Image: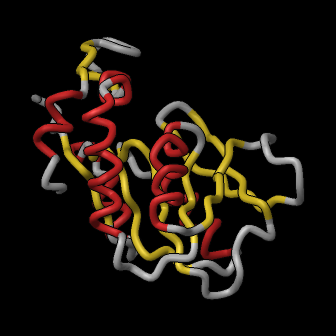
Amino acid sequence: MSIYGDYIKSVIRTVPDWPQPGVNFRDITPLLQNSAAFRKLVDSFVHRYQEMDLDAIAAIDARGFIIGAPLAYELGCSFVPVRKKGKLPFRTISETYTLEYGEAEVELHSDAFHEGDRILLVDDLVATGGTMLAAAKLITRSGGQVVETATIVDLPDLGGSQRIRDAGYGVFAVCSFTEDE
């Protein structure tokens, strides 16, 4: 967790019973609207990764872009979007993953990485881990090496961060929420 983790967590809004009854949605919008909080959020990632040898930040569509782009800028490395199916204009590789209500697919340009590139994979939140694991597989298939996965929020009760660790990837989260918080 980041040194700003408790502060960041306090700025995130919980919306009960959305998008369905029994779900506590963790809304990062207030965090993004608060300039001091947003700066601390980006700084949390910069401080963690500033001394790592990274070639690129890969960020997952679409909220991962919010953190991935300024982080790539601050760290002086490239930014690579991992997009939902059908959103990239060039040759792509894709990976399908399971959702609680079906399947989804993410894509990456086939020339996004060079063999051995060191990649930080970023998204806004880890719930069940399916999207992050699918993106990590894409990066590996394209020749990149996932150095770590990074997220604003971890929901450990949903098991995603553990699934990601079990698959051999490190997980960094600025803050986490349990189901009863």
Total residue callouts: 0
Q: Depth check: 31 or 135 in front?
A: 31
Q: Locate residue 85: give its quadrant.
A: top right
Q: Where's residue 38, x and y in %? A: 33, 37
Residue at the location (47% across, 35% down)?
100
Of 60 and 97, nearer the camera is: 60
Q: Residue at x 56, y 69 (%)?
A: 77
Task: Tell me: 39 left or right of 60.
Answer: left
Identified at 26% across, 45% down, the residue is 40
60 w.r.t. 171: above or below:
above
Residue 12 picture location, percent across and down = 24, 28
> In the rendered image, which quarter is residue 102 located in?
top right
Residue at 28% x, 51% y is 159
Q: Is residue 174 above or below residue 30?
A: below
- Establish if 85 lies above or below 144: above
Q: Position of residue 55 (x, y in %)?
A: 56, 76
Camera sees residue 80: yes
Could you tell me if residue 130 is visible in this image?
Answer: no
Q: Nearer the viewer, residue 75 or 31?
A: 75
Q: Which residue is nearer to you in this view: 93 or 102?
A: 93
- State the image coordinates of residue 181 (x, y, percent, origin top left): 11, 29
Q: Is residue 167 left or right of residue 43?
A: right
Asked which colour scheme the image uses, the reply is secondary structure
Is 118 placed above or below 29 here?
A: below
Quadrant of the image containing the N terminus:
bottom left
Q: Farthest residue toward the bottom?
A: 116
